[in-house]
Image (tube, rainbow, N blue to C red):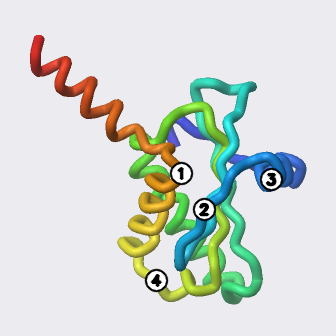
Amino acid sequence: MEYSDSLKKNNEFQKVYRKGTSQANRYLVMYVLENHDRHMENRLGISVSKKVGNSVVRHRVTRLIRESYRLNERSFRQGLDIVVVARPNAKDKSYQEIESALMHLAGRMKIRREAELHVEESKKTEE
């Protein structure tokens, strides 16, 4: 992940859960908190509980979420702590469904940069 780091410690996750805002859909729950320490990078945390399935299933879901974020990383605003929690319904889903769910939540949380990117691109074409 070019512009991101990981949330690793329990207290980092707890801070995002307590102070952040959340949105949910059928497969994922997303918590977002602005990080004032690191303005130019996001930190991503992924939580997949045992309710989702056994170890193999949980790691598969984790990899799908991480890859979905990595490939769409430029679409996210910078300076955020993001925690994505997988719901049990996510266990049998394809990459496309997980990616769609992640981007849907990013849009609902208003953390997508698409509007900013379109403005930058239109300025470049005018010059």
Quarter occupied by residue 66 = bottom right
Q: Secondary structure at mark 4?
A: loop
Q: Amino acid at mark 1?
A: Met
Front residue of 102/43: it is 102
Residue bearing the label numbered 3 = 13
Front residue of 91/14: it is 14
Badge 2 or badge 1: first in the primary sequence: 2
Dot 2, how many residues are within 10 Å of its Cα: few (below 14), some (14-19), or many (20+)? some
The picture places residue 22, in percent across and down from the top left corner, at 66, 58
Q: Secondary structure at mark 2?
A: strand
Residue bearing the label numbered 2 = 23
Mark 2 vs 4: CB contact within 8 A: no
Horizontally, residue 96 falls left or right of residue 55, namely left
* Residue shown at the point (40%, 38%) measured from the top left: 113
Residue bearing the label numbered 4 = 93
Q: Secondary structure at mark 1?
A: loop
Mark 2 vs 1: CB contact within 8 A: yes
Mark 1 vs 4: CB contact within 8 A: no
Q: Amino acid at mark 4?
A: Lys
Q: Secondary structure at mark 3?
A: helix
* Residue shown at the point (70%, 82%) measured from the top left: 55
Residue bearing the label numbered 1 = 109
Dot 4, how many residues are within 10 Å of its Cα: few (below 14), some (14-19), or many (20+)? few
